C-alpha cells in the first residue's frame, strides 16, 4: 500500500515538473508560429482578406493601406462590394457562390477602388476553409495588384496590332499611290486646257486628300528616319504656331504660350516633332467652332524630362473614348481617318516620350506630352 502511494506521489510530482515545461514549450512554438504568420501578413504586398459565410470581413491585411490607401479603421465593418467596380460585382458574387456549392478554390480578376478614386486591377485566389461539418466556415482571399501587368499586356497587344496594320497599310498605300499619281496628273493637265470645267478644283482637292491619307499609311509601315539634332523646344513650338496663324485668325482663336525663361534643349528629329505639334493643334482648332483660347505650357517636369501641354476650350471627348485615341482608323471627326494621332504616338514613342489625354464634354481637352531632355 505504501509503495502504491509512493508511486502515485512520484507520478504526480513528475507531472508537476514536466507539464509546465511541455506547456511552456508549446506556448513558445505557438508564439513563434503566430509571429511568423504576422511577419508574413504585415510585410507582403498581397492583399489578404478573411470572409465569413455572410460576406462579413473579419480580417484585412495591413497591405491594404499601401495598395489601396485605406487605414484599418476605414475598412472595419465595411461591405467589400462597395469597393468593387460595378461591372465586376456580379462576377465576384457568382464566383463565391460557385465556391460554396463545389467547395473548390476560385481565381478571379476584378477591380477595387483606391482611396483616391482610381481603380486597381486585382487577381484573387479564393480559398475555402472547411469546418467540422464539411461546410465552408471562411474564405481566405489573397489578391495581387496586376494593374501594371494589364497595362503591359495591353501595350504589347497594341504594338502587335500596330505592326500588322502598318504592314497592311503600307502595302495598300503603295498599290493606291501609283494609279493615284497618274489620275492626278491627267486631271491637272485637263484643268490647264479646260479652265472653266466645273468641279475640277473639287476633284483635285479630294485627290490631294487621298494622297495625304496614303502618305500617312506609308509612314506607318516603314521606320521613320531619325536624324536627331539638339534643339530648343521653345523655338520649335513658336515655328509651329507661326504656320497655324492664318487658321487661328480665321476661327477667332488666340493662343497663350507659357514657357520657362531658361532654354529646354531636346535631342530630336525636329520635322517629326513639328508634325506631332501641328496635328495636336489642328485637332484643337477643329474642336473650337466658336473660337476661344488654346493654352500651351512648356516646363521641365524633372531634371531629365520636359512637359508640353495643350489645353483647348473645345467640344471635349467623352471619358470612356479616351483610351481608344491613337488606335488605327478610330476617329471622332466626320472626315478623319484616325491615322494622324496614330503617327503622333509612333513619333513620341521613338523619341522615348509619352502622351496622355484628359477631357470633359463641352469643357475642352488637355493633351500632355513628356519628352526626355538632352543630356
Image (tube, rainbow, N blue to C red):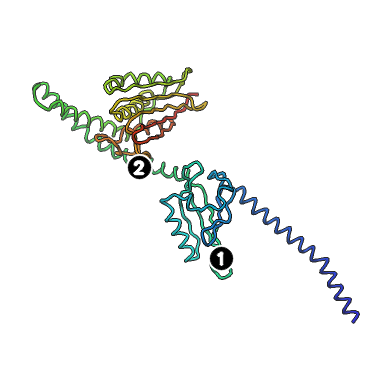
Q: Position of residue 103 (x, y in %)?
A: 50, 65
Please give the label number shown on residue 130: 1
Q: Are marks 2 and 1 in contact (CB under 8 Å)?
A: no
Q: Secondary structure at mark 1?
A: strand
Residue sitting at the far right? 2
Regarding residue 326, the answer to whether it shows in the image is no
Q: Crowding at label 1, few (<14), some or many (≥20) Cα neighbours within 10 Å? A: few
Task: Identify whether 108 is placed above or below 159.
Answer: below
Task: Identify whether 150 is placed above or below 236.
Answer: below
Q: Position of residue 125 (x, y in %)?
A: 51, 56
Q: Quadrant of the N terminus?
A: bottom right
Q: Crowding at label 2, few (<14), some or many (≥20) Cα neighbours within 10 Å? A: few
Q: Earlier in the sequence, mark 2 or mark 1?
A: 1
Q: Position of residue 294 (x, y in %)?
A: 36, 25
Q: Secondary structure at mark 2?
A: helix
Residue at coordinates 90% horizontally, 79% vertically from top-left?
A: 3
- The quarter of the displayed image where residue 255 is located: top left
10 on left or right of 57? right
Q: CA distance from mark 2 to mark 1?
A: 47 Å
Task: Identify whether 40 is placed above or below 244.
Answer: below
**In this view of the protein, which residue sits in the foreground, 358 or 167?**
358
353 on left or right of 26? left
Residue sitting at the far bottom? 1
Residue at coordinates 37% horizontally, 26% vertically from top-left?
A: 273
Regarding residue 359, the answer to whether it shows in the image is yes
42 on left or right of 279? right
Of badges 2 and 1, the one in the foreground is 1
**Which residue is labeled 2 in the image?**
161
Amino acid at each position: 500500500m505504501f509503495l502504491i502511494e509512493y508511486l502515485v506521489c512520484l507520478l504526480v510530482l513528475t507531472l508537476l515538473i514536466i507539464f509546465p515545461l511541455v506547456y511552456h514549450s508549446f506556448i513558445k512554438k505557438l508564439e513563434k508560429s503566430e509571429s511568423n504568420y504576422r511577419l508574413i501578413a504585415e510585410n507582403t504586398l498581397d492583399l489578404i482578406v478573411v470572409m465569413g459565410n455572410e460576406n462579413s470581413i473579419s480580417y484585412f491585411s495591413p497591405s491594404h493601406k499601401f495598395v489601396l490607401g485605406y487605414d484599418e479603421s476605414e475598412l472595419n465593418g465595411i461591405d467589400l462590394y462597395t469597393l468593387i467596380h460595378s461591372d465586376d460585382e456580379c462576377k465576384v458574387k457568382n464566383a463565391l457562390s460557385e465556391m460554396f456549392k463545389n467547395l473548390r478554390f476560385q481565381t478571379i480578376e476584378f477591380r477595387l477602388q483606391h482611396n483616391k478614386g482610381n481603380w486597381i486591377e486585382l487577381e484573387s485566389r479564393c480559398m475555402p476553409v472547411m469546418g467540422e461539418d464539411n461546410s465552408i466556415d471562411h474564405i481566405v482571399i489573397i489578391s495581387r495588384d496586376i494593374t501594371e501587368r494589364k497595362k503591359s499586356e495591353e501595350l504589347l497587344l497594341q504594338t502587335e496590332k500596330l505592326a500588322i496594320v502598318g504592314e497592311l497599310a503600307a502595302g495598300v498605300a503603295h498599290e493606291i499611290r501609283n494609279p493615284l499619281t497618274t489620275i492626278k496628273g491627267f486631271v491637272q493637265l485637263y484643268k490647264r486646257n479646260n479652265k472653266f470645267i466645273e468641279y475640277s478644283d473639287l476633284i483635285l482637292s479630294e485627290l490631294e486628300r487621298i494622297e495625304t491619307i496614303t502618305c500617312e499609311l506609308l509612314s506607318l509601315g516603314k521606320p521613320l528616319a531619325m536624324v536627331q539634332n539638339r534643339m530648343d523646344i521653345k523655338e520649335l513650338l513658336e515655328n509651329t504656331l507661326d504656320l497655324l496663324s492664318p487658321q487661328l485668325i480665321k476661327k477667332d482663336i488666340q493662343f497663350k504660350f507659357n514657357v520657362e525663361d531658361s532654354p529646354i534643349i531636346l535631342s530630336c528629329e525636329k520635322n517629326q516633332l513639328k508634325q506631332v505639334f501641328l496635328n495636336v493643334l489642328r485637332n484643337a482648332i477643329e474642336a473650337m467652332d466658336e473660337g476661344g483660347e488654346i493654352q500651351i505650357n512648356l516646363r521641365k517636369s524633372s531634371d531629365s524630362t520636359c512637359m508640353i501641354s495643350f489645353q483647348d476650350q473645345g467640344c471635349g471627348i467623352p471619358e470612356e473614348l479616351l483610351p481608344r485615341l491613337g488606335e488605327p482608323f478610330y476617329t471622332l471627326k466626320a472626315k478623319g481617318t484616325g491615322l494622324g494621332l496614330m503617327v503622333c504616338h509612333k513619333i513620341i514613342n521613338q523619341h522615348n516620350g509619352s502622351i496622355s489625354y484628359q477631357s470633359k464634354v463641352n469643357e475642352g481637352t488637355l493633351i500632355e506630352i513628356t519628352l526626355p531632355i538632352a543630356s
